[in-house]
Image (tube, rainbow, N blue to C red):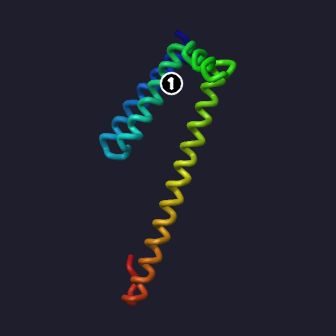
Amino acid sequence: MSMIQVLIIVFALFAITRTILQFKRGAVTRTWLLFWILFWVVAGVVAALPQTADTVARLVGVGRGADVVIYASLLAIFYLIFRLYVKIEQVESEITRLVRKLSLDELEDGSPRL
């Protein structure tokens, strides 16, 4: 086993433990806990057994295992960026709503709130 394989496996185990800690703190939902554990387990398996990526590549019609890993990674990254974008839009909308409400409350009371 090469050094990069060992590093990826160790990092995957580290990421799994961090995800579990975040779940215990309530920062991650059960769905995202399962998603990230599955993601890091797959990353560890592909690092330990690179031929699994070649098998998946043949199944989906891609030339090399490394290519299928890159394609899957890009899909995951774009999906996560989309989720972040939606969440940011929700937060901005909520902030706008709260600022408007505070401003209207301040106008009604006549005194600024801090």
Residue plotted at (51% across, 63% down): 92
**Left or right of 75 in this view: 32:** left
Expressed as whole percent of the image width and height from the top left, the position of residue 5 reads: 53, 17
**Left or right of 114 in this view: 1:** right
Residue plotted at (39% across, 40% down): 31
**Left or right of 23 in this view: 60:** right
Residue with the most extreme left position: 24
Expressed as whole percent of the image width and height from the top left, the position of residue 56 reads: 58, 20
Residue plotted at (47% across, 30% down): 39
**Left or right of 58 in this view: 100:** left
Q: In the image, is residue 113 above or below residue 43?
A: below
Q: Nearer the viewer, residue 11 or 81?
A: 81
As helix, strand or loop, the secondary structure at mark 1 comes to helix
Expressed as whole percent of the image width and height from the top left, the position of residue 94 reads: 46, 66
Q: Nearer the viewer, residue 97 or 75?
A: 75
Q: In the image, is residue 94 above or below residue 49?
A: below
Give the total of numbered labels: 1
Expressed as whole percent of the image width and height from the top left, the position of residue 46 reads: 52, 19
Q: Nearer the viewer, residue 58 or 84?
A: 58
Residue with the most extreme right position: 63
Residue plotted at (66% across, 22% down): 61
Q: Around disc 1, counting alpha carbons within 10 Å, would you say few (fewer than 14), some (14 to 19), or many (20 or more)?
A: some
Q: In the image, is residue 104 above or below residue 91?
A: below
Residue designated by label 1: 43
Residue type pointed to by label 1 = Ala
Quadrant assignment, res 114: bottom left
Quadrant assignment, res 38: top left
